[in-house]
């Protein structure tokens, strides 16, 4: 290490960061590494995702891992995960009084289905209606749902948490999760010698 170079992140953080991005995801989901917030904890990492059907983006989200070796108030342990999901929704669904509890259950049931161990979970479900005015008066009215949540994973392997977040994004986009015994199939990349389909 040279003078002025920051110390290497702790091994526990590095191990957890390697598991933040799921090894396998459904073909509808595109993942990307994104900048993580720097002021919430001494160490952080983040991944972003979009859910597509054909060329339509149905949902976007991000999953942020925070690590503080000393822990913080409200955390149970040195790790904290922060999840955000936003998806377009049919207007009649956003008026359903059960939308909030149902959307919240998507998260907790996905975490439980993947065997993620966690504590101190909390968050919000928001319905948003956007209307255009002035120069945007002709824009269609859009309705969205946003889910923001955070929880403390109880071990360094974050892969079940990341898989649950991917399921949450698909559910918000209206795509049901795969049964546990069904594998994800990825389309084979086209090769130059493949016959062209008319």
Image: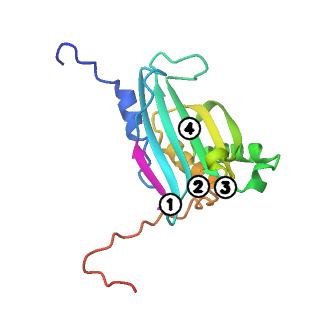
Q: Name the residue rendered at 46%, 20% in the picture.
A: 39
- Mark 3 is surrounded, within 10 Å at the Cα level, by few (under 14), some (14 to 19) or many (20 or more) other residues, namely few
Q: Position of residue 43 (x, y in %)?
A: 41, 24
Q: Where is residue 23 in the image (x, y as percent from the top left)?
A: 41, 51
Q: Earlier in the sequence, mark 4 or mark 3?
A: 4
Q: Distance between the residues labelled 4 and 2?
A: 14 Å
Residue 140 numbered tag: 3
Q: Position of residue 26 (x, y in %)?
A: 49, 59
Residue 28 numbered tag: 1
Q: Name the residue rendered at 42%, 28% in the picture.
A: 44
Q: How far apart are marks 2 and 1 (CA)?
A: 8 Å
Q: Is residue 113 something one can see in this rendering?
A: no
Mark 1 residue element: loop
Q: Which of marks 1 and 3 is nearer the N terminus?
A: 1
Mark 2 residue element: helix
| Quadrant of the drawing holding the N terminus | top left
Q: Are marks 2 and 1 in contact (CB under 8 Å)?
A: yes
27, 183: nearer the viewer: 27
Secondary structure that dominates the magenta span: strand
Q: Which residue lies furthest to the top in this view?
A: 3
Residues rendered magenta in the picture: 27-33
Q: Distance between the residues labelled 1 and 4?
A: 19 Å
Residue 170 numbered tag: 2
Relative to 57, is 8 on the left or the right? left
Q: Which of marks 2 and 3 is nearer the N terminus?
A: 3
Q: Distance between the residues labelled 4 and 3?
A: 28 Å
Q: Earlier in the sequence, mark 1 or mark 4?
A: 1
Relative to 165, is 67 on the left or the right? left
Q: Which of marks 2 and 1 is nearer the N terminus?
A: 1
């Amino acid at each position: 290490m040279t003078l002025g170079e920051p110390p290497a992140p702790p091994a526990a953080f590095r191990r957890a960061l390697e598991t933040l991005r799921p090894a396998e995801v459904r073909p509808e989901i595109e993942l990307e590494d994104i900048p993580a917030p720097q002021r919430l904890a001494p160490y952080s990492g983040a991944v972003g995702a979009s859910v597509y059907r054909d060329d339509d983006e149905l949902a976007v989200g991000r999953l942020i891992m925070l690590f503080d070796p000393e822990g913080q108030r409200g955390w149970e342990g040195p790790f904290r995960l922060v999840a955000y999901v936003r998806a377009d929704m049919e207007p009649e669904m956003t008026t359903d009084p059960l939308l909030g509890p149902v959307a919240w259950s998507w998260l907790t049931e996905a975490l439980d289905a993947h065997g993620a161990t966690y504590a101190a979970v909390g968050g919000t479900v928001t319905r948003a209606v956007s209307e255009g005015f002035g120069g945007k008066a002709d824009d269609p009215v859009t309705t969205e749902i946003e889910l923001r949540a955070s929880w403390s994973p109880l071990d360094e392997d974050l892969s079940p948490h990341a898989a649950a977040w991917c399921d949450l994004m698909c559910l918000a986009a209206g795509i049901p999760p795969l049964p546990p015994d069904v594998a994800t199939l990825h389309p084979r990349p086209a090769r130059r010698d493949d016959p062209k389909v008319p």
